[in-house]
Amino acid sequence: MEAFLAGIPELCNDDRRAFLCSAFHEQRADNPEGYQEAVRFWSQLLLDACRRGLLSRGMAAPPPAAASDSSSDDDDEDDEDVVDRIAAAATAGEAASVL
């Protein structure tokens, strides 16, 4: 994933990366064109990452749970199910309905 992200030109430019990594949901009302641009960028990036198998379950070990973390195994299974469904839809060409 690190190599994949390093190859994204938009993320190599400091100003562009700052824009794309900002809390763009706040732009929805203030800058609707910027908001749509950021949503399109991340949607396409996630789709590409799924198609390459970079977001598949089991690709990396999950981070260790913090001592105060109250999440359950069921939450982890739900997250894995979502990633599996996105990856399956991406490879089946149904990404628009999932994203």
Image (tube, helix red, strand yellow):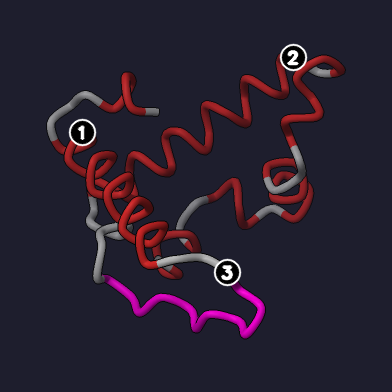
**Residue to which mark 2 is pinned:** 32
- The residue type indicated by label 1 comes to Ala
Question: Tag 3, which secondary structure?
Answer: loop
Residue placed farthest to the right in the image?
30
Q: Quadrant of residue 61?
A: bottom left
- Identify residue type, mark 3: Ser
Question: Where does residue 39 sit, x and y in percent of width and height?
Answer: 57, 28
Tag 2: residue type? Pro
* Quadrant the N terminus occupies: bottom left
Q: Are marks 2 and 1 in contact (CB under 8 Å)?
A: no
Residue at x 49% of width, y 52% of height: 8
Q: Is residue 41 left or right of residue 34?
A: left
Q: Which residue matches tag 3?
A: 70
Report the span colored magenta.
59-69
Which secondary structure, mark 2? helix
| Residue 43 image offset from top left, x and y in percent | 46, 33
Which of discs 2 and 1 lies nearer the camera? The answer is: 1
Query: Where is residue 51 shown, x and y percent of the image?
Result: 23, 46
Residue 89 tag number: 1
Q: Is residue 90 magenta?
A: no
Residue occupying image coordinates x 68% and y 42%: 20
Q: Is residue 29 above or below residue 14?
A: above
Q: Residue at x 34, y 51 (%)?
A: 78
Q: Quick one: label 1, few (<14), some, or many (20+) residues within 10 Å?
A: some
Q: Earlier in the sequence, mark 2 or mark 1?
A: 2
Q: How many marks?
A: 3
Asked whether, in this view, residue 72 is left or right of residue 18, the answer is left
